[in-house]
Image: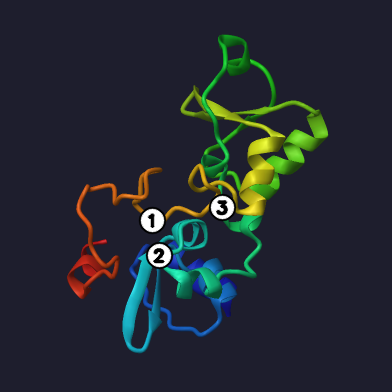
Amino acid sequence: MQDEVVRLHRDEGRTMVFITHDLGEALRVGDRIALMRGGRVVQCGTPEEIVGSPADDYVRDFVRDVPREQVLTVRRAMRPLKDAHEAETGPALNPATTVADAIEAVARTGTSARVVDAGRCLGVVDSTGLLGVVAGLDGRPDGRPRRAGQHEDGLPADGERDDGVPGIEEMAAA
C-alpha cells in the first residue's frame, strides 16, 4: 500500500493527508510529517527535520531508533572546502544523497566526496562528518542536536523565542 500511496502522490501531484501510527511508514510516505501528543502538534516538518532536529525530548525519544543515515542527507555532514583542489576531486554527490549512500561512496573511494548542485561544489563530506551524523553529533558544538530552525547558539533562527509548537495556520502555510 505504501508504494501505491507514493506512486499516486508522485503521478497526481496532489496534496494527500495520510494518517498512521507507524513512524517508519510516515518517514517513507510523507514529505511533511506532523507529530502529535495529546491532540497537539509538537513538531511539523520534513522527515530530515524531524529526525535531525527534534523539537523536544518527546520527539527525540520518538525518533531515537530511526536509522539516521537512511533519512538524513549529506547537507548535515557537509563542511566547507579547504582549498580549490577539493572542489575537483572525489566522487560527486547530489545534496539530497542520504548519509548511508555517501558512506558507501566515501568507503569505496577512500577519499572525501564533493556535494555538487547544478555544477557548483557546495562543500565536501568525509568519513568524520558522516560518522558524526550517524552518531548524532552533527548538531551544536556541544554535541546536542539542534532544533529545527535553530542556530548553533541555540536561539531560534528568527531571533524570537517561542514554544516551538506550530499552530494550525503555520501548518497550513507550510
Left or right: 30 in relation to 77 = left
User: In the rendering, which numbered label is found on residue 55?
Assistant: 2
Res 105 → quadrant: top right
Q: Quadrant of the rendered structure where residue 39 is? A: bottom left
The residue depicted at 68 percent of the width and 36 percent of the height is 128
The residue at 56%/81% (across/down) is 22
Helix, strand or loop for disc 3? loop
Task: Determine crowd level at label 3: few under 14, some 14-19, many 20+ residues with C-alpha closer than 10 A.
Answer: many
Q: Which mark is residue 148?
A: 1
User: At numbered mark 2, what does the secondary structure look like: helix, strand or loop?
Assistant: loop
Q: Residue 91: x percent and y percent?
A: 68, 27
23 vs 96, nearest the viewer: 23
Q: CA separation, marks 2 and 3?
A: 16 Å
Which residue is at the front of the view, 145 or 88? 145
**Residue 18 rendering spot, x and y as whole percentages:** 42, 79
Q: Are marks 2 and 1 in contact (CB under 8 Å)?
A: yes
Earlier sequence position, callout 1 versus callout 3? 3
On residue 72, the disc is 3
Q: Quadrant of residue 164?
A: bottom left
**Which tag, 2 or 1, sits closer to the chain's start?**
2
